[in-house]
Image: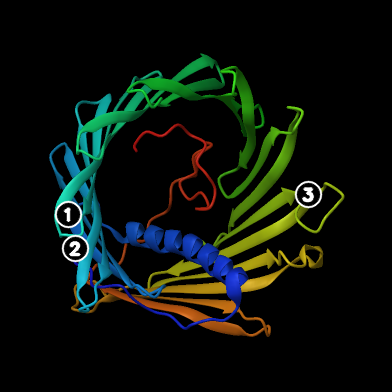
Amino acid sequence: MTRTRFQAHLVPSASGNFTKSILSAAFCVVTAICVQAQDQQQSSGDESWTATKDNAANFNPLRTTESHSKSGNRTVDKQRLEARGLNGSYQPLSETETETIQVNDTTTRTVVRTYQWAGNGQKTLASVTEEESRANAGGDAHVERKTSSADVNGHFQVVRREIADTKKIGPNVEETKRTVYQSDGYGGLAQAEQTQELKTQVADDSVAVKKTTLTPDANGKWRVSGVTEKTIKDDGKNRITEERVSGPDLEGRLQESSRTVSKEAETATGEKKSTVESYSVSAPGYSDGGLHLDRRVTTIQKKDSAGEITEQQVDQANPANPSDGAKVTGRTKYVVKYAGPGTQQTTQQSKTVEIRDVNGNFQVVSSETQKSTQSPPQQTQPPPKPKSDAPADKPPDKPSDKPPVKP
């Protein structure tokens, strides 16, 4: 598989910090859409690939180069970040190498190495994360991860350790307990966080997830620092997810602080539509303590044998006048045109991002194009969505509630 450079052209904007936050949100969501579209085009026979992306979204242009290679039970993924120097050439800043080895059917080992470049151009190893994950046929799993960092003298010390165990504790209930240890400043590790997650399959085929996080207070006593509750309803074509996050008030009582509602639907023709609404409690400008809509992201995806089009609209409340409600602040269009099979044509991709300026007019702030010699994906009937708390096409701005399997 061959990929060509991803170029971006941006137009300056004078809308201030509010405009920057809108652009940042648009980039986060649409980047995930681009990656998803590229992944869908990859053939199952691909064993290696490289991709380069130029991003001129700031005054210091950045370039990201990614590579993937697989041989037997070993997979290596690399990502290098470069910045343009004073002479116009790109200079490396950091590189991350992820090595994954499938030891057997139940055990996976992963090592993540992070490198940095000093001012003299020397490449040095900055941190190493090692993980081993084991699972059995019954669904139980054990994940252990440790991270080591180099001190000022270049000596490595373990600064963080995580242990997570997942077990079935009932016919429809799965429990995951996770403990995090961090450096205590004296050369040892001390418990810094505990989480308990219960995932229950409800009678109506929905899934309920409750995650409780505990942290030690100044006296070393464990206190509940947050609770996340989620419900997922999925009939294969429509999916509704509601997530509520609560935290302790000054008196230690749990109070809901935010809520996210996601709706996904697919028509008989294959058109997909998703809406993600984010609410907050006691947002600036309010005094009633109720829930208020902060942001709404609507995404529509259409696909056929010639390509696909994804359009996204962002409605957001203005922090200066939150009582006015959410208004359209940005929109994005992502187009993929597949190459004809057996030809020398290239698959073309383009993405444009627009935001509304202070005068209410939409301005193009980002324009990106990419060409690839990949063949279009075969049109196959997608499998039904798994009834799980971690959907495959979960909105990118939502945190994952499953215990991490890979760092």
Q: Earlier in the sequence, mark 3 or mark 1?
A: 1
Residue 156's x, y, as percent?
Answer: 22, 33
Side of 110 where 308 appears, left or right? right
Which quadrant of the figure contains the N terminus? bottom left
Q: Residues within 10 Å of mark 1 (few under 14, many from 20)?
A: some
Q: Residues within 10 Å of mark 3 (few under 14, many from 20)?
A: some
Q: Classify residue 235 by image quadrant.
A: top right
Side of 27 where 379 appears, left or right? left
Report which residue position mark 1 lands on. 48
Q: How many marks?
A: 3
- Secondary element at image label 2: loop
- How far separated are the C-alphas under marks 2 and 3? 51 Å
In this rendered view, identify the residue nearer to me: 40 or 58. Answer: 58
Residue 378's x, y, as percent?
Answer: 32, 61
Amino acid under disc 1:
Ser
| Rendered view: 180 above or below 313 | above
Residue 387's x, y, as percent?
Answer: 53, 37
- How far separated are the C-alphas under marks 2 and 1? 7 Å
Report which residue position mark 3 lands on. 282
Amino acid under disc 3:
Ser
Q: Classify residue 208 by image quadrant.
A: top right
- How far separated are the C-alphas under marks 3 and 1? 50 Å
For residue 86, which numbered disc appears in the image? none
Report which residue position mark 2 lands on. 1
Identity of the residue furthest to the right in this view? 288
- Can you tell which of label 2 and label 3 is closer to the viewer? 3
Q: Earlier in the sequence, mark 2 or mark 3?
A: 2
